[in-house]
Image: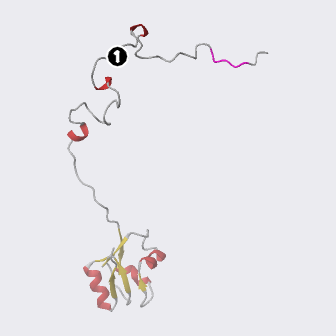
């Protein structure tokens, strides 16, 4: 039984030695052709999208529209706030517990649909004019959260 390991027949080839004369098949220009950017040493092209000095596609195409920071507000109407106890503080945490606000961290805006029957202290990022008027009319207080 022969226990010596050998590579498979034909799997090993000698490394091609470039620039070793015409007889090697890769003499003189070493298979790179004559002159030009790709015949030189270093990078093959300066960057992805380079078109040989022609104005690249990403600069030729017109840019449309704009992007901005999206403002995600949770909207809460006044008629929903009647479910809170008299003279209680209504803020993001209490609205989250009751399920009126879906996601913590979003800004809250109070809208003026419906009627408010209880005197409440309400903290939110924005208030509509009608909501603010209805809250203050019944004796409640409005606190605007900054940020």
* Residue 127 placement (x, y as % from top left): 30, 78
Could you tell me which quadrant the C terminus lies in? bottom left
Residue 136, picture quadrant: bottom left
Could you tell me which quadrant the N terminus lies in? top right
* Residue 123 placement (x, y as % from top left): 37, 81
Residue denoted by label 1: 29
The residue closer to the viewer here, 26 or 6, is: 26
* Residue 14 placement (x, y as % from top left): 53, 16
Residue shown at 38%/8% (left/top)? 22
> Looking at the picture, does residue 108 appear above or below residue 66?
below
* Residue 8 placement (x, y as % from top left): 63, 16
Residue farthest along the front direction in this orientation: 20
Element under disc 1: loop
Residue shown at 34%/19% (left/top)? 32
Residue 114, picture quadrant: bottom left
Residue 126, picture quadrant: bottom left
Instruction: Write the start and end of the magenta stretch as one range.
Output: 4-8
* Magenta segment main secondary structure: loop
Residue farthest along the right direction in this orientation: 1
Q: How many marks?
A: 1
Residue shown at 40%/16% (left/top)? 19
Magenta includes 135?
Answer: no
The residue closer to the viewer here, 77 or 20, is: 20
């Amino acid at each position: 039984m022969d226990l010596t390991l050998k590579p498979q027949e034909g799997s090993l080839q000698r490394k091609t030695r470039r620039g070793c004369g015409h007889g090697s098949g890769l003499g003189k220009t070493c298979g790179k052709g004559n002159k030009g950017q790709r015949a030189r040493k270093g990078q093959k092209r300066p960057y992805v999208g380079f078109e040989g000095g022609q104005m690249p596609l990403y600069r030729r195409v017109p840019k449309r529209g704009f992007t901005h920071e999206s403002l995600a507000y949770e909207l809460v109407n006044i008629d929903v706030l009647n479910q809170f106890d008299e003279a209680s503080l209504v803020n993001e945490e209490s609205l989250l517990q009751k399920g009126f606000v879906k996601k913590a961290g979003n800004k809250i805006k109070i809208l003026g649909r419906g009627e408010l029957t209880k005197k409440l202290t309400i903290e939110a990022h924005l208030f509509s004019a009608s909501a603010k008027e209805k809250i203050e009319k019944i004796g409640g207080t409005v606190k605007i959260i900054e940020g």
